[in-house]
Image: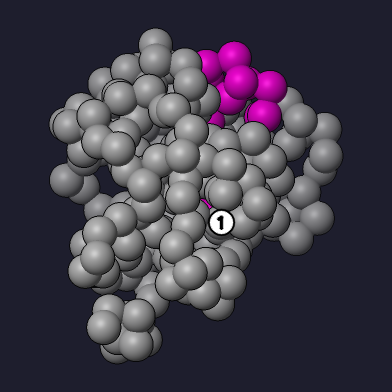
């Protein structure tokens, strides 16, 4: 049976965070809270672990996965930022906006969906950011096509038997997936409207 650990979202136990980080680094699957919905994490550089995640979610390999990082400096090591992308990241990170940007550092094709771009975000949640001090996959903890989980119970009902650890910090703050904005070409576009609405981003779409 999967281990479930409750954490204070504002003052998470450091020992539990270290344990979860070690499990992710070892290629395990960890359900964890974010500011948007509950996420599912593993090591993006461990292709066997990523394949296990794909099988758990029943997800199309071609879609790729978003990466969560603790801060903008970490993101700069993985992707290339234009002036516009830096401006947006500075305004909305930490927060519910995933940016699709050109790769700077090699990432397994199973993570990128065989593209030269990467979706990346700095989450506005202490637990998620502490886990993401080393880049982690941060996809929603659901079976593809089903609702994204806004509580740990939702996540466990969908994936509980297929993961190694569950971190529970109560209901998600936003309850809606992040907005995804593609800035990898000359013409920025919104791929998915989530917590941050299209109207808020219109100045950056011109």
Q: Is residue 41 visible?
A: no
- To which quarter of the image does residue 15 belong? top right
Residue closer to the observer: 95 or 112: 112
- In the image as oriented, which residue stretches furthest toward the top? 48
How crowded pointer 1 is (Cα within 10 Å; few <14, some 14-19, many 20+) is rated as many
Query: Residue at the location (21% across, 69% down)?
Result: 187
Quadrant of the frame with the C terminus = bottom left
Up-down: is 184 above or below 79? below
Q: Is residue 145 visible?
A: yes
Q: Is residue 177 magenta?
A: no
Query: Residue at the location (51% across, 25% down)?
Result: 43
| Magenta part of the chain | 20-34
Task: Assign a secondary structure to mark 1.
Answer: loop
Up-down: is 185 above or below 45? below
Q: Which residue is mark 1?
A: 122
**Is residue 157 toward the left or the right of residue 92 in the image?**
left
Residue closer to the observer: 3 or 164: 164
């Amino acid at each position: 049976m999967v281990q479930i650990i409750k954490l204070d979202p504002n003052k998470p136990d450091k020992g539990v965070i270290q344990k979860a980080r070690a499990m992710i680094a070892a290629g395990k699957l960890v359900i964890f809270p974010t500011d948007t919905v509950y996420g599912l994490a593993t090591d993006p550089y461990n292709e066997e672990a990523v394949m296990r995640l794909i099988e758990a979610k029943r997800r199309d390999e071609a879609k790729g996965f978003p990466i969560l990082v603790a801060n903008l400096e970490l993101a700069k090591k993985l992707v290339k930022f234009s002036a516009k992308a830096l401006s947006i990241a500075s305004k909305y990170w930490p927060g519910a906006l995933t940016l699709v940007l050109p790769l700077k550092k090699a990432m397994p094709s199973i993570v990128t969906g065989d593209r030269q771009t990467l979706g990346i975000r700095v989450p506005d949640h202490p637990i998620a950011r502490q886990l993401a001090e080393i880049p982690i996959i941060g996809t929603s903890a659901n079976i593809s096509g089903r609702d994204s989980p806004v509580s740990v119970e939702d996540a466990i009902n969908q994936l509980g038997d297929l993961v190694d650890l569950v971190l529970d910090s109560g209901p998600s703050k936003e309850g809606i997936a992040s907005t995804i904005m593609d800035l990898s070409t000359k013409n920025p576009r919104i791929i998915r409207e989530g917590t941050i609405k299209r109207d808020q981003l219109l100045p950056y779409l011109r």
